[in-house]
Image (cartoon, rainbow, N blue to C red):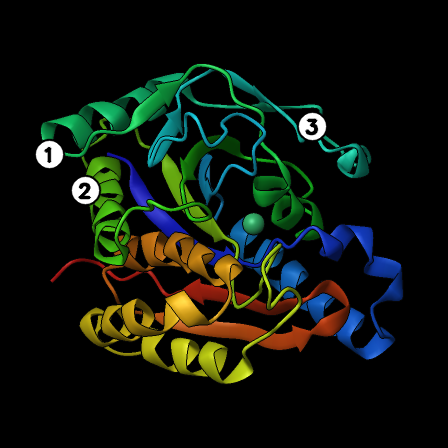
Amino acid sequence: MASLVGAFAASHGPLIIREWERVPPEQKKRMAAAYKELGRRLTAAKPDVLIVVSPDHWSNFFLDNYPAVCIGVGAVNDGPPEPWMKDFPHRTLAGDAAFASHLVDEALRQGFEPAVSHHLKLDHGSCIPLWRMELDRLPKIVPMLLNSIEPPMPSLDRCYRWGELLRKAIESYREPLRVAILGTGGLSHSIGEKTMGAIYEDFDQETIRLFGGAQDGLIRYLDEKLPTHGNGSEEVRNWLVAHGAAGGRGFELVDYLPVPTVIVGCGFAAWRIQAHN
Ligand SMILES: [Fe+2]
């Protein structure tokens, strides 16, 4: 049977690549170290497959057609289309068609209805963390594109439930796969709105604190605060998927720092994976 061997989360703001050289050295050092620490832990978990939960930033979908959730079931997906991601070391990323199709089947059986794609472009949302984690070799990547950037979006509770569902689906897969999950995006940032560039450190710190407690309190807080704390903060949904997969337990902050140069409250987290009770 397959098992969940790791759950992680990391920010992915475009300026983490585009403005990297302008980030003050101390902050750059901390960010680089945090990404590498996630990479070290991911490598130590020896995953065969990594489910990457990220929004699509208009690389596959647009306002006229944006699914709440789309799972990539292709044997291969394309690397990032953004010109400024051209140095990302993978033009294609191998998928796992059989396992991804199992996730879709299980989701449908449980009353969840993802869209399905046989060939996706994995943009900076998926690829910046993979790049900065400096992995020697990539596991197979199963993309889960979750709309966390454009209303209407899936509810926060639904995102947490998606995580729970993924855990069940992983554990019902007959092959002995080792599977990890990476939620990307957040924490607070504001893109293309009046508050563009704002970082809400208090919101980020409270969100981080609440990840250590019961998910009800976390979701209540986010439901109340997200509408006024930057549209990019909505990407915390992808962290909730990882949190749900981990059973709402075992959250560990690897680092957090607000980085004005990249206009993101940069967060890095891992979950200690525990067996079910
Ligand atoms: Fe994003």
Residue named by callout 2: 168
The one nearer the camera, 67 or 49, is 67
Compared across the picture, whether 200 is left or right of 168 comes to right
Residue 18 disc label: none
Instruction: Name the image quarter holding the C terminus.
Output: bottom left
Q: Secondary structure at mark 1?
A: loop
- Could you give the CA–CA distance between mark 2 and mark 3, rounded to whole angstroms? 33 Å
Above or below, 274 against 91 in this view is below
Do residues under tags 1 and 2 come within 8 Å of each other at their CB atoms? yes
Above or below, 126 against 271 in this view is above
Seen from this angle, which residue lies furthest front?
194
Tell me the amino acid under the disc marked 3.
Pro
Q: Secondary structure at mark 3?
A: loop
Residue 110 disc label: 1
Residue named by callout 3: 81
The one nearer the camera, 65 or 109, is 65
